[in-house]
Image: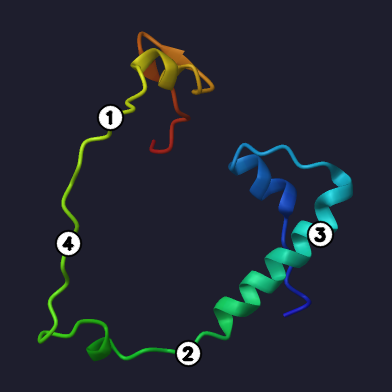
Amino acid sequence: MDNISIDIKHIAKLARLKIDDSELPRYESEMRDIIGMVNSMPDIEDSLIVDPNNAMELREDKLADDKLSRDVMLSNAPKVVAGCVVVPKVVD
């Protein structure tokens, strides 16, 4: 697993994070540890995922009291046109 190449700069760019070059080795090491942990997780059988005798109890949906205004939310977007967030084209 040590030969896996992890491009932390690319991941940071996708996540819109700024990471100092001096921190790259630490983040790469931590990412390798996470990947190792996920790879070491045991496989589970499909039949164990859902137990028909113990139905899940869903939480009640509640409205948030501390709603942000549309203007505040759009102020966090990198590009806004006519009140809509502009995203890169992903389908031709």
The residue at which mark 3 appears reads as 26
Which amino acid lies under the numbered mark 3 shown in the image of this protein? Arg
Query: How far is the residue under mark 4 from the one under mark 3?
Result: 39 Å
Distance in Å between CA atoms under marks 2 and 3: 27 Å
Point out residue 81 in the picture as x, y percentages from the top left corner: 41, 11
Query: Which label number is shown at residue 65?
Result: 1
> What kind of element bears circle 1?
loop
Q: Which mark is residue 58?
A: 4
Q: In this view, does 22 lie above or below 69?
A: below
Observer-side mark, 2 or 4, equals 4
Q: Which of marks 1 and 2 is nearer the N terminus?
A: 2
Report how far apart the C-alphas of labels 1 and 3 lie in the structure. 39 Å
Mark sitting earlier along the chain (4/3): 3
Label drawn at residue 42: 2
Q: Could you tell me residue 71's position as x and y percent?
A: 40, 13
* Residue furthest right in the image: 22
Image color mode:
rainbow
Q: Which image quadrant is residue 28 in? A: bottom right
- Judge depth for marks 4 and 3 and give the one in front: 4
Q: How far apart are marks 1 and 2 (CA)?
A: 41 Å
The answer to which of marks 1 and 3 sits earlier in the sequence is: 3
Q: Nearer the viewer, mark 1 or mark 3?
A: 1
Instruction: Look at label 1 and name its amino acid.
Output: Asp
